[in-house]
Amino acid sequence: MSRLVVISNRVPLPDKSGTAPAGGLAVALQAALEERGGVWMGWSGKTTTSRERAGFHIHEHGKITYALVDLSRKDLDEYYAGFANRVLWPLCHYRLDLTEYARKDMAGYFRVNRLFAHHLAPLIKPDDMIWVHDYHLIPLASELRQMGLKNRIGFFLHIPWPPADVLFTLPVHETIMRGLASHDVIGFQTSHDVENFAGCLRREGIGREIGKGLFEAYGHAFRAEVFPISIDTAAFAHVAQNAQRHAMVQRMQKSLGDRDLIIGVDRLDYSKGITNRIEAFEHFITNNPGSQGKVTFLQITPKSRSEVPEYEEMQRTVAELAGRVNGAISAVDWVPIRYVNRSIGRNVLAGLYRMARVGLVTPLRDGMNLVAKEYVAAQRSEDPGVLILSRFAGAARELDGALLVNPYDIEAVSNAIARALSMPLEARRERWNQMMPHLLEHDVSRWCEDFLKVLAAEPGGSTGADQAA
C-alpha cells in the first residue's frame, strides 16, 4: 500500500495521546495516514518577522510525520489574507464585488506554494500518493511537477467552483486552471462544480472531456469527479445523545422553558447569509404574532478572519442587526434572538442541535455545509426537528428531506420557518428517515476511501466514483 502525503493550509496536530482534534475531516485523514503511513504538511501557525529565518519543523507521531512550515507576516498578508481570502474565496462564492486583486498578493500566493513544494519534495518517496486540500494550494502540484515529481497527485476543493464568466474576471485564471490540470484527480463537492469546471476548459479552448469524468488539458489527462464531503455521522449522533447531560445544555433547556428553539451555526462570513436569516426570522415573528414569546432563535457565529477588513465590518453589521430586532420585538420576559459571537464546544453544540425544533442553514453559497449534516445526525429518531436548507448549499444535493429555500427570498424563508414549526410528527420522522441512512452510509470515512480509491486507480480506469457520489 502506497504511503499517503496530505497537504493543507493548517495541520491539526494530535495531542500528547496521539488523538486528532475533534472534527470529522481531521479524524478521517489521520485514520488514513495511520493506516498507510505518511506525511501531513502545512502551515505551523507560527509567524516569523522579516529578520527571522522561517522554520521547518518535523514531528513524528506513530506512522505519521507532521511537517510544519513557518510563514512570515508578509507571506500571511499576501498568500492567505490577500490572494486566497480576498480574491479566490469571494470569486468562488460568486462575490465579484468583494474581490480585491493585487499583483503583490498574487505573487505571494505563488511564492508560498513554491515554498511548500520546496520543503515537501525531499520528503516524497517515488510511490507516495499526494493529496492536496483546498483553494490555498491550487498551484502546489504544478510546482512539484516542475521539480520532476511523477507521483499521483489529487486535489480536493472544499468550496464551490465558479462558472467561466466569473472565473475569467481573475487576471491569472489561466495559471490557476493550469495548476488544477496538473493533478491526476480533482475532487469537487457537487456535479454543478464539475460542470462549471468543464465549462471553463471548453470556453478557453484549453481542454476537453475525453471520457466520463476524464479530461485532457495542457497535454495531461486527469479525472474531475464528485466527492461530497461528510461528517463522522455515527460518532456525532452518539455525542448528541450524551450531550443532554452536559451542564450548559441543561441550563439552555431550562432557560428555554417550553419555547421552541431555532438554531443557526455559522462561521462569520458573508457567504453564510446571516443577515438575510435574521431578517427572515424578524419577518416570521412580525407576521405570526402568536409565535411571540413562544420561540427563540439562537445564532452561534464565531469570529473569522479578523485580519480581513470585510469580516470586521460584517461582525458589526450582524451584531447591530440582531440588536435592532431584539430592541423592536422583545418583551420584558422574552428575547427573540440570542446571538453568540464565539466558538461553542462540539459536545455542547451537538446537544443544542438535538433540542432545536428547526435547523436554519441558509448560506448564500456553500461548497457543502457540514452544519446541515450535523443537525440531522444530532436529532432524536422518535421526535426529530426540521432542517431548513439553502438550495445554494452543496448539501442540498443530498439532503432530500430538508425544506429547501432561496436564502435571498426573505418571505419564503419566513414561511418555511412557520411550516417547520407546525409540521406534524409523522412528517418530521419521514423527512429525517430520508436523510439519516444516507448520512450513515456516506460518512467522512467513506468520502476519504472513495477519493483515495480513485487516486490510486490508473488514469481512465473504472473507479466507481459515480456510485460514491
Image (tube, grey):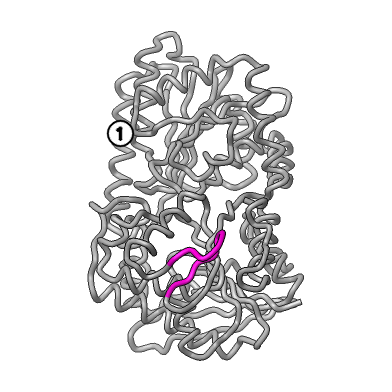
Regarding residue 137, the answer to whether it shows in the image is no
Residue 342, position in %: x, y? 46, 47
Q: What is the residue that sits farthest to the front in this orientation?
A: 210
Q: What is the residue that sits farthest to the top in this orientation?
A: 290
In the shown orientation, is residue 62 left or right of residue 225? right
Is residue 211 part of the magenta span, yes or no? yes
Residue 291, position in %: x, y? 45, 13
The span picked out in magenta is 208-217
Residue displayed at 66% across by 31% down: 434
Residue displayed at 39% across by 88% down: 52
Magenta: predominant secondary structure element? strand
Residue 47, position in %: x, y? 41, 76
Residue displayed at 73% across by 38% down: 242
**Which residue position is annotated with label 1?**
321
In the shown orientation, is residue 246 left or right of residue 210? right
Q: Amino acid at mark 1?
A: Leu
Whether 253 is drawn above or below 126: the answer is: above
Count residues near mark 1 (Cα–Cα under 10 Å), then give few for <14, some for 14-19, many for 20+. Answer: some
Residue 425, position in %: x, y? 65, 17
Label 1: state its secondary structure.
helix
Whether 433 is drawn above or below 216: the answer is: above
